[in-house]
Each structure stands twice: as C-alpha cells, then as structure tokens.
Image (tube, helix red, strand yellow):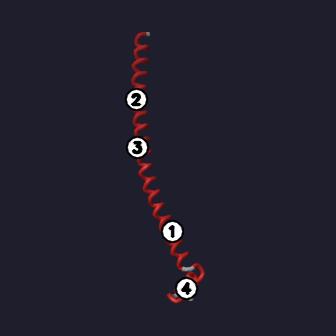
Amino acid sequence: MGSLSIWHWLIVLGVVILIFGTKKLGSMGSDVGSAIKNFKKAMNEGESEGENVAKQIKQSITGDAEFSENAKNSSKTTSGGGEGSA
C-alpha cells in the first residue's frame, strides 16, 4: 500500500502528457538539458579561474615573504652597524 506500482506511475505519466502535451514536455526536457550543460561548463570555468587565482595568491605571498626577509636582513645590518659604532 505504501509503495507505488508500475501501473500507478503509468497513470501519472499519462495524466502529465494529457495536461502538458508532448511538445511542451519535449521543450522542457531540452531546456533542462541545456541548463545542466551550461552549469557544468560554468563549474569547469570556475575551477580553472580558481586555480589561476590560487597561483597568483601563492606568488604574491611568496613574493611578500621574500621581500619581508630582505627587509628584516637590511634592517638588522643597518641597526647592527649603528649599535656597533655607538
């Protein structure tokens, strides 16, 4: 009683076809298919853009880290030389 048999599904399918018609169902199916295709395409493009952004962030972080180390080294030599002469 709780599960629907194949006959129930065939009756539901028949009623849906009578209400919407085959042309409307066909166009709805193609619209859903194209929407799924566009969604997958956008997901793939988003992944490649995300990889590019991640590379840029990594390069900027690496570049900043090297710059910070150089700044620390130069400040140590500057402050170290000034203390030694004083």
Q: Earlier in the sequence, mark 3 or mark 1?
A: 1
Q: Nearer the viewer, residue 9 or 36?
A: 36
Q: Earlier in the sequence, mark 4 or mark 1?
A: 4
Residue 84, compared with residue 3, is above or below; it is: above
- The span from disc 4 to disc 1 (Cα, nearest Å) is 21 Å
Number of residues whose C-alpha sits closer than 10 Å to that of mark 3, classed few (under 14), some (14–19) or many (20 or more): few
Disc marking residue 32: 1
Number of residues whose C-alpha sits closer than 10 Å to that of mark 1, classed few (under 14), some (14–19) or many (20 or more): few
Question: What amino acid type is highlighted by mark number 3?
Answer: Lys
Local secondary structure at mark 3: helix
Which residue is found at the position 45% from the left and 63% from the top?
37
- Label 3 near label 4: C-beta < 8 Å? no
**x and y percentages locating residue 57 in the rendered image:** 44, 41
- The span from disc 3 to disc 2 (Cα, nearest Å) is 21 Å
- The span from disc 1 to disc 2 (Cα, nearest Å) is 55 Å
Question: What amino acid type is highlighted by mark number 2?
Answer: Glu
Residue at far top of view: 86
Q: Nearer the viewer, residue 63 or 19?
A: 19
Q: Is residue 82 left or right of residue 10?
A: left
**x and y percentages locating residue 12 in the rendered image:** 56, 84
Question: What amino acid type is highlighted by mark number 1?
Answer: Val
- Label 2 near label 4: C-beta < 8 Å? no
Disc marking residue 69: 2
